[in-house]
Amino acid sequence: MEKFLHITPHSLALVLSRVCREDTEGPPSSSSSPPAPAEVWEKLEHHIGYEVFASFKAVNMQHFWNKALTEALSEIFFLGWIDEHVLLIQSQEVHLEVLRNTWTRRTLKPPQGFHIKCIARA
């Protein structure tokens, strides 16, 4: 039997992975040229958890036709940011269920610069 650590009631963990530069801009440029300073900075950049959370909300609030999702997003709270790839959010169970359902239906969008690998109960 597996044991799970329940961090806090009524919370979700969004496990994210960073989008590779190649994923966003097509094929990489020639390998003989050195990377531009902006490319190097992107690789070294540390994301601040609340900024990732704000990006997640902003991207998904554009689903104005899905009233349940926009209502759920307006009621979620930033709980934490672990290892620069796990976003913890908290809300009422009803709103968390809406987020799980929209992710299952592939309509929930990730924060800018990330992919959502999975959503788990925290």
Image (cartoon, rainbow, N blue to C red):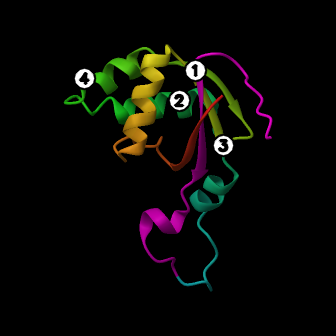
Based on the displayed image, in which of its 4 quarters is residue 105 positioned? top left
Give the spatial CA distance, label 3 vs label 1: 14 Å
**Amino acid found under the numbered disc labelled 4:** Lys
**Amino acid found under the numbered disc labelled 3:** His
Q: Nearer the viewer, mark 3 or mark 4?
A: 4
Image position, residue 28 (x, y; %): 51, 76
Image position, residue 112 (x, y; %): 46, 44
Which span is picked out in magenta? 1-29
Q: Earlier in the sequence, mark 3 or mark 1?
A: 1
Q: Which residue is mark 1?
A: 78
Give the spatial CA distance, label 1 vs label 4: 21 Å
Image position, residue 75 (x, y; %): 43, 14
Given contact means CB atoms under 8 Å apart, are the residues at marks 3 and 2 in contact?
A: no
Q: Which residue is mark 2?
A: 53
**Amino acid found under the numbered disc labelled 1:** Phe
Q: Earlier in the sequence, mark 2 or mark 1?
A: 2
Q: Which mark is residue 67?
A: 4
**Amino acid found under the numbered disc labelled 2:** Phe
The residue drawn where x is 24% and y is 23% is 67
Q: Which residue is mark 3?
A: 85
